[in-house]
Amino acid sequence: MSSVYPFKAVFPQPEIAAEVSAPPYDVVSTDEAAAAAAGNPISFFHVSRPEIDLPPGTDIHSPKVYETARENYIELRRKAPLSQETETCFYVYSLVMNGRRQTGIAAAVSVDEYDAGQIKKHEKTRKDKEDDRTKHILTLRSQTGPVFLTCRPLPDLAKITRLAMESKPFVDFTAGDGVRHTVWRIAATSMVSAIALEFRKAPALYIADGHHRAASAARVRDELRTANPHHTGLEEYNRFLAVIFPSDQLAILPYNRLVTDLNGLTKEQFLDKCRTAGFTIGPAAAATPEKPGIVHACLGGGKWLKLTCKADRSKLPPTEQLDVSLLQDLVLGPILGIADPRTSTRIEFVGGIRGTKPLEERVDQGKSAVAFSMYPTTVDQLMEIADAGGIMPPKSTWFEPKLRDALLIHDI
């Protein structure tokens, strides 16, 4: 049973939604955010990445950065302007990328259920990233970007969603990356109640993307609850902003790897050790593996090698069956000496949305010694691991398309 709540969203006017909203703060660098916001004073990057408006070299975790975020947010609400609903609503949020549509419900979800493990996670979080978002939310008193959740399909909810999509969209635009974002408002009491009841049939919700946002929302709730002598549990800070998609509509792209050196080995020695570790090696017909149990490696010249694991890993625990675990357990750790990919400076992770060409270029330029192209983790694997209380290796999943920050904002 999962609890979802309508909320009074803060939002940009439809005609400027494309200009105001922005990709998630954590998928762009400071330089990329600055370039995207150049010449656009109402870009939300001025709030989500406020260091772009401060002198170069400013510590991005300094108090001045959070103060600037708040000042910019207040100014954006006035200037854009941003408006706020007068009644609580749910929203249908549709994303179309390369002709494929996924449609979810934007809602506020329970921090209590997150704390209780009913909103399930599959990644560890980093304290420094939690600290950053916690300060950002507390300073703005707003959650400005949604957590990307999934759940197993609810057929009756799908019927309600389709009905809502027959009305005129609240927002509809195609972003610069070609992704179409469409939002429908659901304010009718009967439909709001029906959606809440449908989600009570969901045994659990799963975090697909946004572990740090969720963890930060829980920390914010703890701080505000402690500071509020009249806390009731009904305050908006007890909930966090999310968009919930049915699992059968999601696509996960691979999360590829680059390693700076071969740990003192020649290319031939590296490949020999891979064979000893249980791989057969041959030329790859394409850069991306066609099925699980296979990793493709590029050692230069734009040529990819197919590394096929000979062992049957189907009896291993779910986390160890992942291809990213296979690579770590048999290659990265024992052969290349990368014991902890979370902390090693010798490994870089590249989201599948960038394709494999940048991997080849990095190796050919001598900036990396080897690139690994991965077969993507599946949504079923993610949910199975989360159900078991497991934690995936770092950078196991890359979800596309991304939700936009500031399209819907949850004031707390």
Image: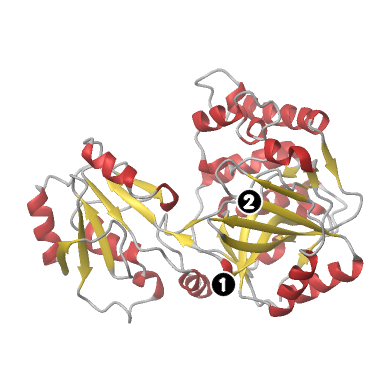
Residue 48 higher or lower than 253, as above or below: above
Tell me which label, 1 or 2, sits earlier in the chain.
2
Q: Position of residue 133 (x, y in %)?
A: 62, 43
Eyeballing the image, is 397 above or below 60? below
Q: Nearer the viewer, residue 32 or 383?
A: 32
Q: Amino acid at mark 1?
A: Asp
Q: In the picture, residue 54 is in which quadrant? A: top right
22 displayed left or right of 140? left
The answer to whether residue 289 is visible is yes
Q: In the rendered structure, which amino acid carries the disc numbered 2? A: Arg
Task: Quarter of the image for the N terminus: give it.
Answer: bottom right
Residue designated by label 1: 248
Residue behind mark 2 = 180
Residue name at image x 85 percent, y 44 percent: 84
- Could you say which is closer to the camera, residue 366 or residue 235? 366
Q: Position of residue 238 (x, y in %)?
A: 76, 56
